[in-house]
Amino acid sequence: MQSSLTELKKLISDVDFKHFTEGLDAKDPQSRANAKKRRQFMWKLNNVYNEEIMSNSASRAQVPPLEAFIYEIRKIMYPDLLNDRVPDLLDLLANVDRYRRRISENAEVALAFDEYYKHQNLDVPDVLREGEIEILKKIQKDGEDLRGLYVKILQQFFILDIYHVWTTVAKLTIILHRLGQYFPTLVPGEKTPTMSFLKDLSADEQEEIRQTGLDCRAFVKDSAGLAQERKPEKYVQLLLCVHIGFRHVRSQTLLQFLQSDEFVAKHPCTVDFAELRRITDCYMYAIETQSSQLKTMFPTVAKSPQKSH
């Protein structure tokens, strides 16, 4: 990496920037020469960046292996869910899905090259066997289903976590923060996603997440409203939250209501964590299996995805 940066610095230091940014005058030989230098410089710069930095093995080595992400996720889920680490779990899961996409891309490339070699009748000893082709095709075929499962897992953890936070804390500032982490467009002051698992969603996936957010927000609003209706004389208005749409009440009194047998019986959490954990394990096992299959066929190809920022 250091040698790549040194080469970049040398490229820049060799350029005479005095006339480097002047506009092109087709009639002026010096202007044409400057334009040519600009093209050459940008070409060299692009080559160094792509070939030496972006593909640098040291950079890729900084990305933890797939097994490390899965290990950390299971530590959060077992033996019991560490509720305060659910956002961390989802960020880790997003990296697992990035591995899945990289695996699928490598499978697609391998199939394309194999098809090319066979159609060109090239004497290549390492063409794919029929069993390997079937494995690669299955990896591609399963990609869409696994992606859909990943998004569903996100949604289920959102619902589970919002329910837990609201019914164990019942503080507006805390629930607003958590809603902002999961559904930034639904909370005042929050627009740009900051969590890794929200940064590479398609338009359809974003809409699915938004609908889940609306349901979670409605649950918070309706449960607080129900508490006020049940025993209004015990509740004191502290704050009117226009965006959520309910009046904040004394946290301790509200918390007592949210944890009451009556409320829990009528409004249980719709997510069974044991089942969600099982599904999450199945999802991760499928990707571990794909990764192992690809490494067996192409030991030098199964590289880590670029580290997300």
Image: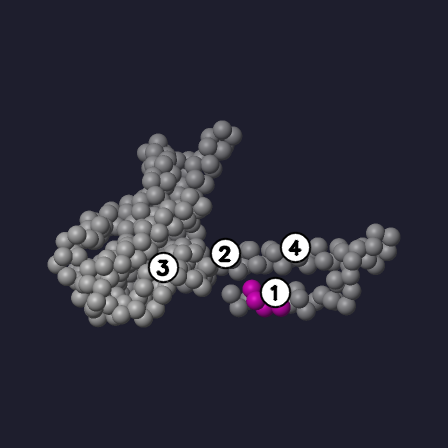
| Sequence-earlier tag: 1 or 2 | 1
Q: Report how far apart the C-alphas of labels 1 and 4 lie in the structure.
A: 12 Å
Label of residue 43 in the image: 4
Q: Which residue is labeled 2 in the image? A: 55
- Residue 101 lies, in percent from the top left, at 40, 47
| Sequence-earlier tag: 3 or 4 | 4
Task: Look at discs 1 and 3 and give the one toward the viewer.
Answer: 3
Residue 116 or 246: which is nearer the viewer? 246
Q: Which residue is rendered at x = 33% and y = 56% of the image? A: 217
Q: Residues within 10 Å of mark 3 (few under 14, many from 20)?
A: some
Q: What element does badge 2 sit on?
A: loop
The reply to whether residue 196 is visible in this rendering is: no
| 40 lies left or right of 274 | right
Q: Amino acid at mark 4?
A: Trp
| Sequence-earlier tag: 3 or 2 | 2
The reply to whether residue 283 is visible in this rendering is: yes
What main secondary structure does the magenta stretch of the protein show? Answer: helix
Q: Report how far apart the C-alphas of labels 3 and 4 lie in the structure.
A: 52 Å
Please identify the residue farthest to the right as the structure is shown. 27
Q: What is the quadrant of the C terminus in the image?
A: bottom left
- Residue 4 lies, in percent from the top left, at 56, 64
Q: Report how far apart the C-alphas of labels 2 and 4 lie in the structure.
A: 17 Å
Residue 285 or 47: which is nearer the viewer? 285
Q: What element does badge 4 sit on?
A: helix
Label of residue 8 in the image: 1
Could you say which quadrant of the image residue 247 lies in?
Answer: bottom left
Q: Amino acid at mark 3?
A: Ile
